[in-house]
Amino acid sequence: MSVKHGLLALLVEGPRYGYELKSGFEARTGDTWPLNVGQVYTTLARLERDGLVAKDGEDAEGHVLYRATPTGLREVQDWWDQAVEREAPARDELAIKLALAVGLPDVDPRDVVQRQRTATVRALQRHTRRRNALPAGDTAAALVLDALVFAAEAEVRWLDHCEARLVRSRNGAPR
């Protein structure tokens, strides 16, 4: 997840201070990825150092406002214009865990699959409830929650596949 680009995208709408950016990011993503306000200000400092944002005075309450610079606006436009690369995916802890569990004498990978399936189904139910509770018209949060629902559904399907492969492997069937 690119916090940098998320904050820049919000600044396209106009100057904001750190906590406004934190709140706006969380609202747009359905409170799925909470940001630490310290992370927001650290990111703003880097963006300012790199010439992508600049301080834009203060509001009536003394909050320092930030705005996207022309370079920052080009950077966020480039982000919109580029697809998210999937060739080198992030390390998947669950896939690594299962791969390492296979063949270890004291670990039953089918137990690992069962525990994960239970946890993933619970997450799927939470994401579905949150999505269904959204106010009508909250398209941004609905899109994020849809992605989480679809990812959880895919993980359950993959876990089913893993379990079947493990059973075949133990019975000597071809993989």
Image (cartoon, helix red, strand yellow):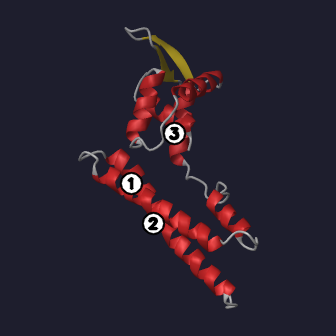
Name the amino acid, label 1.
Arg
The nearer-to-camera label among 2 and 3 is 2
Outermost residue, front side: 106
The nearer-to-camera label among 1 and 2 is 1
Q: Nearer the viewer, residue 134 or 11?
A: 134
Q: Residue at x 23, y 47 (%)?
A: 136
Regarding mark 3 in the picture, which secondary structure is present there? helix
The label shown at residue 153 is 2
Q: Do tag 1 and tag 2 residues touch (Cβ < 8 Å)?
A: no
Left or right of residue 62, residue 142 in this image: left
x, y percent for residue 165:
62, 81
Q: Which of 114 and 96 is in front in this view?
A: 114
The label shown at residue 112 is none
The nearer-to-camera label among 1 and 3 is 1
In this view, 44 is above or below 25: above
Left or right of residue 112, residue 16 in this image: left
**Which residue carries the number 1 mark?**
126
Q: Distance between the residues labelled 1 and 3?
A: 34 Å
Rate crowding at label 1 as few (under 14), some (14 to 19) or many (20 or more) other CA atoms within 10 Å.
some
Left or right of residue 29, residue 161 in this image: right
Q: Residue at x 38, y 59 (%)?
A: 125
In this view, 57 is above or below 130: above
Rate crowding at label 3 as few (under 14), some (14 to 19) or many (20 or more) other CA atoms within 10 Å.
some
Q: Do tag 2 and tag 3 residues touch (Cβ < 8 Å)?
A: no
Name the amino acid, label 3.
Gln
Q: Which residue is drawn at 29% across and 53% down?
A: 132
**Which residue carries the number 3 mark?**
77
